Image (spheres, rainbow, N blue to C red):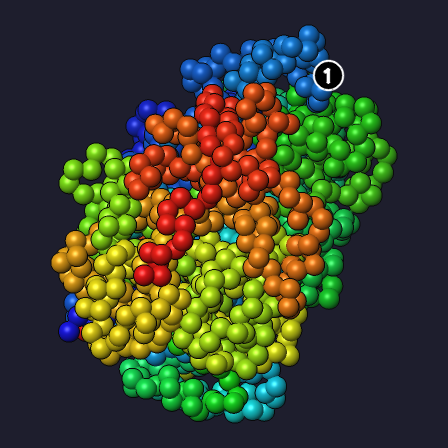
Amino acid sequence: VDSVAVSGFGLLMAGLPRHATEGLCLRDIDTVGIAAIMTRPQVDKRTADALTNLVGDARGGAAIAVGPGNLLVVRLEPSPSWIAQLSHATDGVAHVFDHSSGYAVLELKGSAGCIILQKGIFIDLDRGLADVGSSVCSVIAHINVLAWRSASDCIVIAVPRSFAGSFWHWLTTAAAAENIALGQKL
Amino acid sequence: VKRLALDGRIDRTKPLSFRFDGRAYTGFEGDTLASALLANDVRIVGRSFKYHRPRGIMTDGPDEPNALVTLRSGARAEPNSKAPAIELYDGLAAFSQNCWPSPRFDLMAVNGLLSPLFVAGFYYKTFMWPASFWERIYEPIIRRAAGMGRLSGAPDPDTYDRSHAFADVLVVGSGVAGMSAARAAARRDKRVLLVETDPLLGGRLLCETGEVEDRPCANWLADAVRELTSNDRVRVLNRTTLFGAYDDHSFAAVERVADHVPVPNHGQPRQRYWKIVAAEVIFATGATERPIAFGGNDRPGVMMASAVQSYVNRYAVAPGKRVAIFANSDSGHDVAADLVAAGIDVVAVVDARPDAVASSTRFRVVRGQVVATHGKSLKSIDVRGEDGAIERIACDVLGMAGGWNPNIGFAGHLGARPTWCETTQAFRQSTLPAGMCFAGAADGAFSRSAALVSGATAGSSGEKPSSLVADDRAPCVAPPLLVKGCRTKAFIDFQHDVTVADVLLAEQEGYKSVEHLKRYTTLGMATDQGKASQVLGHALLAERRGTSIGAVGTIAARPPYTPVAIGALAGMHCGVNLKPLRLTPTHDWAAENGASFVNAGLWRRAQWFTRFGDNDWFASAVREARAVRSSVGLCDVSTLGKIEIAGRDAPALLDRLYTGMISTVPVGKCRYGVMLREDGFVFDDGTVARLADDRFVLTTTTANAGAVMRHIDFATQVLWPNLDVAACSVTENWAQIAVAGPHSRALLQDLLPDLDLSNEAFPFMGALAGTWEGVPMRLFRLSFSGELAYEIAVPSGYGDALIRTLARLGRQYDFTPYGLEALGILRIEKGHAAGGELNGQVSAHDLGLGRMLSKKKDFVGRVMAERAALVDPGRPTLVGLKPIDPTQKPSAGSHLLARGAAATASASQGHVTSIAFSGVCDQWIALGLLANGPDRLGEIVVASSPLRGTQISVEVCSPIFFDPEGARLRG
């Protein structure tokens, strides 16, 4: 089989220590479903809210409001038919666009995750990422980022795939500036 | 060494070596450069700005006007560093500045003899003639003579960082008011951010003796520090200076992360820029002691009394053996008491108040004023007593205690103007933006007890007390003091050498506003921004004008509060962090195959692929273009903008966006389209593919991907919000590879054996969505090269796998990867407009695309595109150009002139837009925009480049140089 996917951060992380126990543990998430869901103009707010609840059950992912009637839904390890299911579930109410391969996605495990991200994100992360499932949509070093809390000690961050290398440069620079060791979480 | 037996805040178990002007000295951990120099009896540290007068250490903090040094050397040299603000570290090297050959003997001191010439505003009155001397002689001399240190000129080897902080309550300053404010806020369960310039918390508590809440200062402070640092809702940033207050409760600060070490550790920034947002801010910024204007008040050994107290109590250094204090408040007496307790000989406290009384039997109190000082560094002072008699008193240090200026500049950053308070004899902020207050000495609560109450009140409520906190002692209250009858220079602004005489002259010459006084004399314009001195100047101006200081007012403070390195402001936003790069999905493969890359916007695109035998890039590009025409080539076109449009009204929207009819495109087909701007000029071009009745995907040029998306968002959200349509950029989601050349069909058929790619089944402009080995795939039969060609798209994560598979399968067809240069050749051979032609100033008619302007529907730009000037046949229109001499190369940008016409701008009839060497034509070919172009085929014109000095005759021809019938792309 030739069709083997390359993950956004996989090669960049190759040099990091494995099974790290200190600092910030990173995990490249290469199986992720990301979809933009845009409600149709005639859809009333109640229906839109119902849609948010419907797709908000993201199971380790997030439902991120990126604009009026505009959601970005993230699902970790989705089924191959996830996009089709979403389209079916929102038929007549919203339009669905697949972004699953458009982002490089990284999990940051450890309390240092917020410290590092706060260096780049001008949003109060103590509040913005306080609860599991909460999310922010911002910019780090001129790169669009989405971040959400996937677990009490984990934040997941997604950046447009073509920017993965530049984001990695920022991340490693920021970690070094705080003297935070980076390692791989396998 | 003049160390005292006191403990201080230095660690005597950790001695440090340092050098000043090349000489070796020692100090201790906890010292500043200033305290260590004083401990080593170094009294003259530099020379003054204008008169090159010897100057010593005057203060104990960042408001120091005199002891400016260059810290470190080489690329890390930092001029104008203030010695009292430099933490001592082992190996520190500092250098005096503004003197030659040394601070003790400076040849430029001759300026002092010329001081009658260097009065206020002298540069407005001198150097007037001859006019030509100004740039050639005067200005270079003045620039060379001006002081204030020199930059190294070398690139800064260090890095700078940036971070953000959010808090419910921001407390600035950690003196007694700041600490009590922070504690009170923390006890309200607020998120507290405490910012302190000093490495240690405590503010003036570190320098004073006495008690707080009936406990020794040190003990109270230790408990307060413990309480705050053990609370996880409190964050303390020491070595951090807040330097700006801005709108929306935002603030800027700089943290000196590694300024106290010789070289930052690997990855460690030197400084960190903080952007802070806080719902409430309490400025417990303290007060700066005010100097006194008297003759010779700048002599080394004349210091602020509070600084003398600091050096004794905090650093265990005796600044002198015989100390005098000149005061007009009780705080000078407090300092004298501390010095006596430390075993220092206090020879006199000269008190300018007529009702001054002896506060102690341990030192002499003299009612009078200091009128003169003597010695290169201070040896004695002349005191004029109540009876007018002059008494000379020998001393080597004189402490000035002229009252205190509350540090209120931050309110000025937000437009608040201070008012004069008679009670505190200082400017205070009476009206402040919501959520902001001053506390402690910054609000006129000078005594520790008053500051404690003031801070606690602010921390408890987030508001300043409704009235001034009752100050049971207020030892610091004193009016600005200007001693009359001095025969020598009395300085107001020490750093800029502004004297009493300068201020009086400025007023005499009509500069009666404090803002005008500042500009004319430079009072308060130095790196200390007049923190200590300008109130004194304003008091003098008021006195001269015969009015009150409140009526005169004070200047508006602006950020930064203290100087900030440009590098710190940039933070980590330089290089890739300032301008991130976008890599295509096949970047690694391209690099492995010899690609040279070029920046195209933020993208890094393969420009050409070097092969063995290629002499240069030109050879590579021509080889690649030939290979596409003869075999098959692969090119990553993922950078093209890709936008999906979905919804019942998607066809209607696209009809309005494009000049041509899109709604009639059947499912499974593509159409070339042109978009206009509202003004009728061409905006962008690309293809539209219909994937389903209600779903399209369109492509844009790489450069306009973002602009077209914004254009569509504007159309759907503002122009026609009721359309049932949604648009979404999917550029990042899809890797797209052009497969072009006679063997492209065979190659793709090998890749996709289950599809029928025959011309009948999948003709030119066909589109389909399917799978490749189970991966979603889109295939378009499009051609930018004029060859049989396809573009295949897969999710970006599979782009690398796709290109490697195509390359493996393509070996049997002798495939060639090609880059932007070859792409340019191929498109010029086919006359396709691109960046050179789509310059924002061309109409569809200019590009020969007038027939694409539909007459059956409306679209953006239709009306304006039909303006007479835009359809004038005389407009420059797209043509092909071939040099008469095939070996000659016209330059892109050359003007097109009629033969025999003068090479003038008015004679220009157009210009060359793109140029390439065509392998199939075996000569240079070009595209250009030429007036009446289509009517001039066969005419010879001249491509003239005044920049290169070339004049090349070219024949006007069709812009389609190769396969004008399009047989190859449809084959």
Image point (56%, 28%), residue name? B897
Q: Which corner quadrant of the image does residue B533 belong to?
A: top right
| Residue B689 in view in this figure | yes
Task: State left or right for residue B900 relative to residue A171.
Answer: right
Q: With respect to residue B649, does A178 lie above or below?
A: above
**Side of B600 where B848 appears, left or right:** right
Give coordinates of residue B702: x percent, y percent. Answer: 43, 55
Please name whichever residue, B786 or B98, is drawn nearer the observer in this view of the structure: B786
- Pick out the residue farthest to the top: B130
The amino acid type, in three-letter code, at marker 1 is Lys
Q: What is the quadrant of residue A48 in the picture? A: bottom right
Q: Secondary structure at mark 1?
A: helix
In the shown orientation, is residue B672 left or right of residue B921? right
Q: Position of residue B800 (x, y in %)?
A: 24, 63
Disc 1: which chain? B
Could you say which quadrant of the image residue B782 lies in?
A: bottom left
Residue B157 visible here: no
- Residue shown at 54%/74% (left/top)? B663
Pick whichever, B707 or A134, lies toward us: B707
Q: Residue at x 21, y 64 (%)?
A: B746
> Which residue is more in the foreground, B756 or B715?
B756
Quadrant location, the C terminus of chain B? bottom left
Image spot of residue B35 (x, y percent): 42, 38
Dot 1 alpha-carbon crowd within 10 angstroms: few under 14, some 14 to 19, many 20 or more: few
Q: Which residue is mark 1?
A: B125
